[in-house]
Image (cartoon, rainbow, N blue to C red):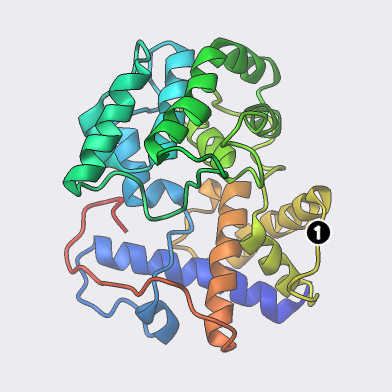
Amino acid sequence: MKAEAVESFFNWINERHAIYLRRLEGTPAPWTTDKVLQTYKFTNPFRENDRVTIWMRKHWTNEKDLRPHEEILFNTCMFRMVGTPEFADVHGWVTDWDPSYSKKCIQDRIQAGDKTFTGAYIITNQGIKKPKSEVVVDNFLTPVWERRKHIVEHMKTYRSLQEAHKKLSHFQGWGGGGFMSYEVITDLMYTPVLQNPVDRYTWANAGPGAKRGLNRIHERELTKSLKPDQCNDEMVALLNIAKAMLADHVPWKDVDMRTIEHSLCEWDKYERVWLNQGRPRSLFKPQEHIKKGSV
């Protein structure tokens, strides 16, 4: 590993989390002297501090959820497939799946110009020539509903993020690079469905941004292809030195493989700006007063 790159990576985590804490404390802007972090939007190193995830924990699922595990699984899938608290709040929790209701709920909100699908990531129709509401409900969600008990049994048997990810990725809309499956199993880690998985500190699904980050760490071509096992070995190596590299204000006990993977992706964006290799798509729009978990 290149020492300067490793230091830059952990410095990004340190400063991005410091910005979160300064805003939370009500400190006036700017919350950093770093011009890149002042200008562009970067998500939190800890996913649990993001606004949507905090809403989800408070209003949708949590670690003490006593509802049937198959319900928790499906409703987590529905929440992330659409991706906005505004939609979830109107739609409500599913105990008995009615696809026609969900499709109408999506269509009515879109026609009214109400926020429905998240802008944080793109849900494509995967070439299916139907309205998005029908594709999401009929092709992506209904098969999960029909096999929800089987999926949960698989997760309970293995207690593994990797195995859960592999299982959910078999379903249309959840496979490919596995981004959507990864979002859901990360959520389930904070519910009784997949609490305390055996590989929380040894496995993560490295996306394209994380792979570029690893290539930067190891001074390789940014486009170099990496196999999953290599990605995991290299992310574990970073996790193993995290305690020594993180500042006192960063809760290193909360740092897991998801934190490393996600931070590699965000740090890659940061390095692109710093090295004049590109720009993130979103500018940072500061809000002076925030509630915990909203930045």
Where residue 82 appears, as percent x and y from the top left, is 38, 39
Quadrant location, the N terminus: bottom right
Quadrant location, the C terminus: bottom left
Where residue 215 appears, as percent x and y from the top left, is 75, 70
218 relative to 182 in the view: left or right: right
Residue farthest along the front direction in this orientation: 129
**Residue assigned mark 1:** 226
Can residue 46 be seen here? The reply is: yes
Are there few (<14), some (14-19), or many (20+) residues within 10 Å of tag 1? some
218 relative to 31 in the view: left or right: right
Residue 223 against residue 199 in the figure, above or below: below
Nearer to the camera, 246 or 36: 36
Q: Which residue is drawn at 41% across and 32% down?
A: 134
Q: Which residue is drawn at 34% across and 63% down?
A: 20
Where residue 207 appears, as percent x and y from the top left, is 64, 55
Q: Which residue is drawn at 60% across and 32% down?
A: 172
Nearer to the camera, 138 or 52: 138
Residue farthest along the bottom direction in this orientation: 276
56 relative to 180 in the view: left or right: left
Kind of residue indicated by mark 1: Leu
98 relative to 112 in the view: left or right: right
**Which picture quadrant has residue 238?**
bottom right
User: Secondary structure under badge 1?
Assistant: loop
Q: How many labels does the image show?
A: 1
Where residue 206 appears, as percent x and y from the top left, is 67, 52
Q: Residue at x 58, y 46 (%)?
A: 179
Residue 163 against residue 118 in the figure, above or below: above
Nearer to the camera, 123 or 256: 123
Can residue 256 be seen here? The reply is: no
